[in-house]
Amino acid sequence: MIMSSVDWKNYEPVIIPDIKDLHKIDVYKKNGGYNGLKSVLTDKKKWPEQKSVIDEVKAANIRGRGGAGFNAGLKWSFMPPADGGPRYLACNGDESEPGTFKDRKIFEYNPHLFIEGALIAAYAMQVTTIYVYIRGEYKDYIDMMQNAIDDAYEGGYIGKDILGSGYDCDFYVHSGAGAYICGEETSMLESLEGKRGYPRVKPPFPAQKGLWGRPTTINNVETLAHVPGVIKNGAEWFSNIGAANHPGPILYGISGHVNKPGVYELPSGIPVLDLINKVAGGMRNGKKLKAVIPGGSSTPILRADMLDGITMDSDSLRTVGTMMGTAGMVVMDEDTDMVDMLWRIAHFYHHESCGQCTPCREGTGWLEKVLLKIKNGNGEIKDLDLLLDITTQMEGRTICALADAAAWPVRNTINRFRDEFEARCKKSVHAVA
Amino acid sequence: MPEIFIDGQRYEYEGEHQVLQFIQDLGKEVPFFCYHPSMSIPANCRQCLVKAGSYVKDKDTGEYEKDENGDRVIRWFPKLQTSCQLKVSDGMVIKTQETDEDVVRAQKDTLEFILINHPLDCPICDQAGECPLQIQTYKYGPEGSRFEVKKVHKPKRVQLGPRVVLDAERCINCTRCTRFTREISKTSQLTIVSRGDKNYPTTAPGEQFDDPYSMNTVDICPVGALTAADFRFKARVWEMNQTPSIDITNGKGCNIDLWTRDNLVLRITPRVNEAVNDHWMPDEGRDAYKLFNENRISRPLQNLDGEQIMSSWNNAVATFNEEVEKAGSDDILIIGSPHASVEENYLLSKYANLLGIDQPVFTTHIESGKGDGFLITDDLAPNTNGCRLLGFKEMTASDLKKRVQKSKLVITINDHFVDRNVLSADDLSTPFTIVFGTNHSQTTKLADLVIPVTSAAEHSASYVNVDGRIQRTFRAKETKYTNRRLDLEMSEGRLDRYGTNFDNWVNEDNKVDCLPLWKFFSKASGETGLSIEFDDGRDVMNEIAETVSPFNDVSYQAIDEQSGIQLELGESKKTTEAK
């Protein structure tokens, strides 16, 4: 276990710093905005070729903030050599995982940082078209993003011959239509192409065949917002922030039974208990902490007694069998009914399964219905084992990870709060002999 | 040569393969629903899971690494793989349900999932008996169900289009139908709507599923979700006989199966032939099952004082011979037909030869613009090229009209000239008209002598399609003069084999009183001393092969072995455009 030595108290936010009107392009520029892009495009000494940008980002080890935690620079390096045909960067701002609400802060308070990051990424991968896919419910944020993009076009940061460098790039906002599955990367590509959001079979991977069959990289919005910092301050600066193996600033979205829920920008590797008690103002009404879902509803739940010494980075969280996810933390106090909570999560995944693969289409519904039965007091002990069985039948047998995302919370919540579930089940009338 | 190891057996391969197809081609089996060899691979049913890995080769030596027991080290994929989309690669190791417990378990699990929301109404489902879900559940499925909550309810009995009915509850969302309309018929009329376990395929709101190939979706549906509107609840598949045949409603000659029960053709489905129609056929060809059952000419008809009356075969033969004798050889016009088989046309030509009169003529039945470049052709007749290869003179409609008006005796077969506006009623009023026919029409009504002949469902005969491929039919239903049990070439269904006279549903009413054309000519010529003596289509074809050069290599055996033979068409004969 990595003991926390992260000095989060003196951390100065860089993604959503406290600067008035930062969303306006003039304010952003005044605060050093677009210097990273300018440097990459014009400073040939520092960035002799596109690959040097990729190498720098790879060295910074920006772990993807969409949940999978994959090194962003490494992902960029998977793009095949340019062949003159179109290439795409698709930015994932669908954020639909329950408990996750971080990207909207970027859209609202610092959209140009994300735009700059995306443009640097596009330049590094020789991409000339960028899409940002934002969930349809974010109507206001879609408008904010569009305004920011319009301003950036006007300022000469997007479009033809950016900053006189001869590099052209277009930037489009695409609105989702309310499906959770469209946040899955290949399903998002289908949706961008105007099709039904069914995840694609991999291989071929998007870097080979993505949008319209062309090389495409997909990055989370927050991931790209970290890129300008890395370009301006260097990979070392970034990798020195927070936990060694999962470095950088993180937008923690804290919700649930805390006094001050919200999005907090802090280094990775901060102790979970500090995050709850010090950052988010402690438990509401002085109640006792019961459980924490660390990174969006699909990540396995943690009991309060498992939290000692656990920090918010993938290595530490793995020791207690969960993961970082989107860092959208859900905090629950002693009054929380685990059966009701799990049923609600199962209901979500049932509602959002796209229905392409059999195990997920049928399994999510079955899970929800059995949980409903238990919730209503009609369950039996054997139903708990049935639920655990269904989760094994679903996991790892589908095209995308939604089946896993639906199965993990059920398995882990039952395993970690089994007594509560058993208490809700009907007592067996048969003698156990 | 690259090698792959499946269930412990080593196989060599060349080229690119998918594991599932490769295993099937070996004659082994992995269960699946969504995969179809002619369409894209969505890998969504997750039924064909196998364990896959590869032998580890030492990078430096290129030798296989061995473990302490001397066995080759295998690096397995972390998850089970869908064999349908997994590419065969050198050194790959595959374990199917035959050798691996995890695979058995995974396939059972998937089937359990598929079945929880399936209505399990096999006893009233048309698909029962030929249902991949039913078959694979028996073979690989769980013994019972642990599903004790409420099933999902979805629309039932939805008339998607004129020919296809949807039961969305039975649907397992394999997307074969939607992929068919997108990739094969290219109308994109079907799509999946809703989400998760409420998914089902349907058309856009207010749209009809009237794709000219719509019924192929019924064939490829792996459950009873899509059924044929006019075959629903008609028969159980195990009560029917299945006989290979050829589609005679257009020039493509799609390979088909005729499904019969009690001497009625109840449905027509496509039979795979990659050289002609792959797995598909147009809906029009399926509708032709009615031609074999309804409106059939049964017993000869003779015109007596302006009225057609039933006659006897003896009378018909006598009248036929009298009229031929009466009309001297110059005034007889024999018209062949692209709607009749090669054998029937050849008989007309042989008869003309023996009489010493002109070879038969014919006129094509082509409507330009009808074809779609796929399986529907401009040519509405199945054997235009057959007539051409027999050397028949091709006449325009107006030339034919003139010749008919000048003749004293006209003999035609199965070409409804009046119905298709080539000849008028007046044209036929002057000469004595003898029609060999299968179905009643305006044309047969005007004939002086109508002789019922066997249809494509009742004789073995061959047809040359628009591309010059000769293919043949088999006897699928009995006539008054044939017997399924004595005819070794006729298919035998479950009822024929195990039924008794009391329960095998055989009804004399459905047997048509007709003769194959060669039987009639054998009868008729015997009385006039002309020698025409054939037992069946095979005899006729043997003689054609000997005497007509384009057919030299043709025999029924060769046609059967190669599912059709490509014939050389002369340059002039290749065009099928309307004249």
Image: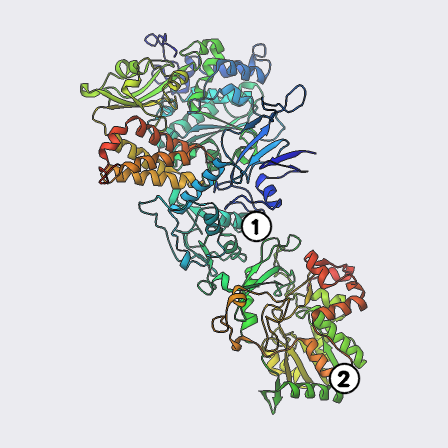
Q: Position of residue A114 (x, y in %)?
A: 44, 21
Question: Residue at left 54%, top 43%?
Answer: B30
Q: Classify residue B537 as left or right of residue B194.
A: right
Q: Classify residue B53 as left or right of residue B13.
A: left
Tag 1: amino acid: Ile
Q: Is residue B479 above or below residue A105?
A: below
Q: What element carries label 2?
A: helix
Q: Where is residue B176 in the image (x, y as percent from the top left)?
A: 50, 48
Relative depth, front residue between B174 and A213? B174
Q: Residues within 10 Å of mark 2 (few under 14, many from 20)?
A: some
Which quadrant: the C terminus of chain A?
top left
Chain letter belonging to callout 1: B
Labels in figure, total: 2
Chain letter belonging to callout 2: B
Relative depth, front residue between B110 and B435? B110
Residue A15 is at least partly visible in this image = no
Q: Position of residue B14 (x, y in %)?
A: 68, 38
Q: Quadrant of residue B15?
A: top right
Relative depth, front residue between B356 and B56? B56
Q: Earlier in the sequence, mark 1 or mark 2?
A: 1
Q: Which mark is residue B331?
A: 2
Instruction: Please determine if labels 1 and 2 lie on a single subunit.
Output: yes
Q: Where is residue B549 in the image (x, y as percent from the top left)?
A: 81, 65
Q: Is residue A39 above or below residue B578?
A: above
Tag 2: amino acid: Asp
Q: In which quarter of the image is residue B280?
A: bottom right
Disc 1: which residue: B184
